[in-house]
Image (spheres, rainbow, N blue to C red):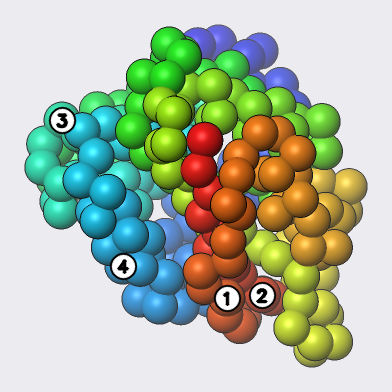
Amino acid sequence: MSRSDLEGHVPALGFAGLTRFYDTAIAVSMREPHWRPRIVDLVAQEEPATVLDVGSGTGTLAIALASRLGPGVVTGLDLDPDVMALAQAKEDAGDVRWQIGSATLLPYADGSVDTVVCTLVLHHLPLDLKETALREMHRVLRPGGLLMVGDWGRPHDPLMRAAFLPVQLLDGFDNTQRNVEGCVPELMDATGFSGVERVHRLRTVFGTFEVLTARR
């Protein structure tokens, strides 16, 4: 993939030079032990043969899923080869299949994936690409397949709203506006998913984070 393919791509922390600090920033600010294991548990309950982690970033979730589900079950897909290189250098990364690709044009056949997870990705995208990415996830899921989205949601209160401002400054006010309005569940519903449910919601250093599930 050439650098031209990355045009318009927003790096994990807003700027490419900050990517190497991503894991530390998330660990410190996002209360990971309160939601990543929850996602792994919910996915494991499905006993999926194929899991796709869309926008897998530095690979923390993909590797955790593979450790639970076994080698070869999980594919981590990300547009940025630099961030994928960080993922592939981690311990147990060999249990994951790694694929360079875009959330808005998934390189998989219709109905070919049992479970899709997508964490801290949608807030990077403008509204039209949020919708495109969700439609692509819907397309590649098998009928009845599970989608799990973890991302920023409507703030609990004014304090959480103020805490979210640094994220908006880094990732763009237009890209993040639907998240802060609490519209991601509506977008999931509008792009074909059913039974959209908020299964977790928590306060973090940078605002309200939520985990949503839905079915194709």
Asked whether the viewer can see residue 177, the reply is yes
Q: Amino acid at mark 3?
A: Gly
**Label 1: few (<14), some (14–19) or many (≥20) C-alpha neighbours in 10 Å:** many
**CB within 8 Å, label 2 to label 3:** no
Asked whether the viewer can see residue 25, the reply is no
Q: Relative to the observer, which residue lies in front, 143 or 17? A: 143
Q: Relative to the observer, which residue lies in front, 41 or 175? A: 41
Q: Amino acid at mark 2?
A: Thr
Left or right, 153 with reference to 77: right
Say which element carries label 1.
strand
Q: Amino acid at mark 1?
A: Arg
Task: Of the two numbered discs 2 and 4 on the same chain, state the one appearing first in sequence.
Answer: 4
Of labels 1 and 3, the one closer to you? 1
Q: Which mark is residue 37?
A: 4
Q: Which mark is residue 201?
A: 1
**CB within 8 Å, label 1 to label 3:** no
**What residue would you read off at disc 2?**
208
Q: Relative to the observer, which residue lies in front, 166 or 113? A: 113
Task: Of the two numbered discs 2 and 3 on the same chain, state the one appearing first in sequence.
Answer: 3
Q: Which mark is residue 72?
A: 3
Q: Quadrant of residue 142?
A: top left
Q: Quadrant of residue 190?
A: top right
Gap between marks 3 and 4, in whole Å? 20 Å
**Label 2: few (<14), some (14–19) or many (≥20) C-alpha neighbours in 10 Å:** many
Gap between marks 4 and 1, in whole Å? 14 Å
Q: Residue at x 15, y 30 (%)?
A: 72
Location of residue 104 with respect to 166 vertically, above or below: above
Location of residue 211 with respect to 48 vertically, above or below: below
Gap between marks 1 and 3, in whole Å? 30 Å
Left or right, 50 with reference to 116: left
**CB within 8 Å, label 4 to label 1:** no
Q: Residue at x 81, y 38 (%)?
A: 126
